[in-house]
Image: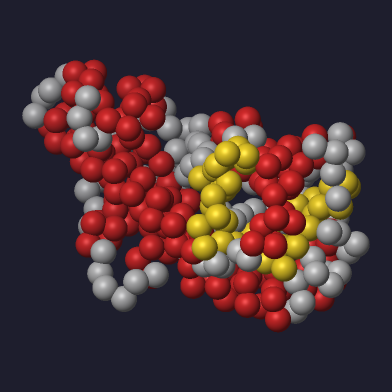
Amino acid sequence: MKVAFLGLGRMGVRMAHHILAAGHELAVWNRTPGRAGELTARGASEAADPAAAVRGADACVLMLFDPASAADVLAAVIPAAPPGLLVINCTTVGPAAAREQGSVALAAGLRYLDAPVIGTIGPAEAGTLRVLVGAADADLAAARGILETFGDPGRIDHVGPVGAASALKTVFNLGLAEATAAAAEVLRYGTELGVDRSLLLSELAAGPLGFIVEYKRAMLESGDYSTPAFTVAGLAKDVRLATESVAGRLPIAEATLALTAAATRAGHAEHDFAALAAADVPDPA
């Protein structure tokens, strides 16, 4: 199968390696040049632009940052896409944008999967990401061979039509963000009371916030957030998608956004999202 992979960030480059290792012909493109070296050394071709990447392709994977970047790249893909091109959008775009981009692709005679992934760099490296899929049955069947290169075959979950997967992804990431914000606040509270940090982390790990504390314990103990699995900026973007996806307010999400803004002002935008608990993050304005 000839596959175009568009977006070689921390996640995308790892996912693309798995597609290439599975024996597919691979063309890659990234907005910022210089990230395709390892892939081209292994046989991938680097395209000058998205249109060049998809010419003659059977499938196209999008792994970009946000709804706007995904929409821009999709707009560049459509004029050059072969009829029936299978577009697999793994970008976290939110439900409304997923439905809109799906409609644009379908109107252009393409097939479209809303396919955000759950997991960070470790699972991307291992090829064991969970893939949420919103698509027609036939389109998922056509794409499954590609999805199983970077996703755990037992965790490719068909959750409904286009838009359903992006809705569920925002639910998951909002829970992750709010749990992180809660852990950050409790840690600061305990620290201000003079409780030993190691004791604090052990207590939190055994309680309701245990998952997130154990997941990020090494960073929380060391205070070094400089090697991100998922950045503060990425988390903020996904929380913002959640707040924009419903008519009513999400007060805890809004407070979490204020905390991500404080972390960004403190210089942590490109650090791991566990930096919400950094000692130098000021109180949100």
**Residue 151 appears at what percent x and percent y?**
62, 41
**Residue 131 at least partly seen:** yes
Q: Residue at x 75, y 52 (%)?
A: 5
Q: Locate residue 37: give its quadrant.
A: top right
Residue 209, image x, y percentages? 25, 35
| Horizontal side, residue 150 vs residue 22: left or right | left
State whether residue 32 appears in this view.
no
Depth order, front residue of 105/49? 105
**Residue shown at the point (16%, 29%) measured from the top left:** 191
Residue plotted at (43% across, 32% down): 225
Q: In the image, 34: left or right of 190?
A: right
Is 226 drawn above or below residue 151 in the view shown? above
| Picture mark count | 0
Residue 96 vs residue 274, the one in the foreground: 96
Q: Position of residue 158 (x, y in %)?
A: 55, 55
Rendered position, 8 above or below 202 = below
Left or right of residue 278: residue 155 = right
Check the image and report above or below for 72 versus 128.
below
Q: Quadrant of the C terminus?
A: bottom left
Residue 184 location, x and y as percent?
A: 26, 39
